[in-house]
Image: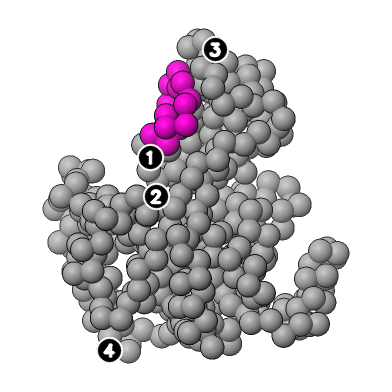
Amino acid sequence: MRARRWWGWPLVPVYAAGLAVRDWMRRKGWLRVRRLEWPVVSVGSLSAGGAGKTPVVIALAELLRAQGWSVDVLSRGYGRAGTGVERVNLAAQNAAGRFGDEPTLIAQKAGVPVWVGAERFAAGVAAESFAAGGGEADSSASLRNDKQESLRNNKKKVHLLDDGFQHWRLARTVEAVLVTEEDLDDALLPRGNRRERLTALARADVVVLRDEERGRVEARVRRWMREGAAIWSVRRELRVGDSLGEAKAHVQTLGFCAIARPEGFWGMLGDVGFALAEMVDFGDHHAYTIRDIDALATKAKALGATGFVTTEKDAVKLSGAMMERLREVGPVCVAGLEARFVDEADVMRGLEARCQ
């Protein structure tokens, strides 16, 4: 079993006991669970981060939209500066800071409404009210057009609940859980990064596996799944874009990121041919400051690096001034992790059957 924090072993039994008590209360029906009008498809994971939930949420949103569904995403908006329930507005100043980096990235890439709030039920109520035409007036033409379109059609409607496996207060129609090979060998928090025991997979309607890992882990995962639960496979690809029109992929590059499992990102960069002068890790969801950017620029110059590479999740947090500072050294390449379901028809059949 993998262990990350040596000091966490004495606290694991305490954490596990808390999980057991909460699960017992859930099974007894003592935890209040509220239900939205639209079906809810939860996308979650066993781990505290790095399983790849955001690309899967985006892939699901794109797939459902392509099939004519009306889709939105409900997210906590971890680390955001905003309060209450808000819809992500990409035109807002420092959108990633106000709404959260992952919700901003989902709204940007999937092109669907994303609602953030600590209480996901309240976010869902706001989303449904808005779509029904009963929400508060908004000065944004794009939001008004969305509302009018929703009123004109009778599309199937669905909420995607981002990082919902541990958010028991909102009832869900489909419980989809991402599991990685690393999760199976990890320890519980705080010693490791796993938020729940493997027995929690019995709650899942669907387990989502990485296609490259499925052959090695499927038998292990099925031991914990309930009868009738499905397995979906996702194929992941790192796409190296040039959002600024000047980035080059194969230069001596300084890599930096603030994600939960940076080693996976570094490995994928190597696979597509990046020559990394150095790799700089920040904590997950780190909010960059100009001091951070100055330090990166200084380090790059000292190493003789001629450019930078980072993730899409990080790029949405970089202001224009930060980008300009980095470009004084060299181009900034943004690498995006895209996920696609291996059998999209099977995924849609499963969703259609459950989200009537």
In the image, 146 versus 76, the foreground residue is 146
| Picture layout, residue 78 above or below residue 332 | below
Q: Earlier in the sequence, mark 2 or mark 1?
A: 2
Judge whether residue 164 can be spotted in this image.
no
Q: According to the image, label 3 marks what residue?
A: 301
Contact between labelled residues 2 and 3, with CB atoms less than 8 Å apart: no
Q: Callout 3 environment at 10 Å: few (<14), some (14 to 19), or many (20+)?
A: some
Q: Amino acid at mark 4?
A: Lys
Nearer to us: label 1 or label 4: 1
Per the image, label 3 sits on a secondary structure element best described as: helix
Per the image, label 2 sits on a secondary structure element best described as: loop
Contact between labelled residues 2 and 4, with CB atoms less than 8 Å apart: no
The reply, left or right, for residue 70 in relation to residue 34 is right
Q: Start and end of the magenta stretch?
A: 267-281
Q: Amino acid at mark 2?
A: Gly
The reply, left or right, for residue 226 in relation to residue 108 is left
User: Of the numbered discs in the image, which one, if any, rests on residue 28?
Assistant: 4
Q: Amino acid at mark 3?
A: Lys
Q: According to the image, label 1 marks what residue?
A: 264
Q: Earlier in the sequence, mark 1 or mark 4?
A: 4
Q: Earlier in the sequence, mark 3 or mark 4?
A: 4
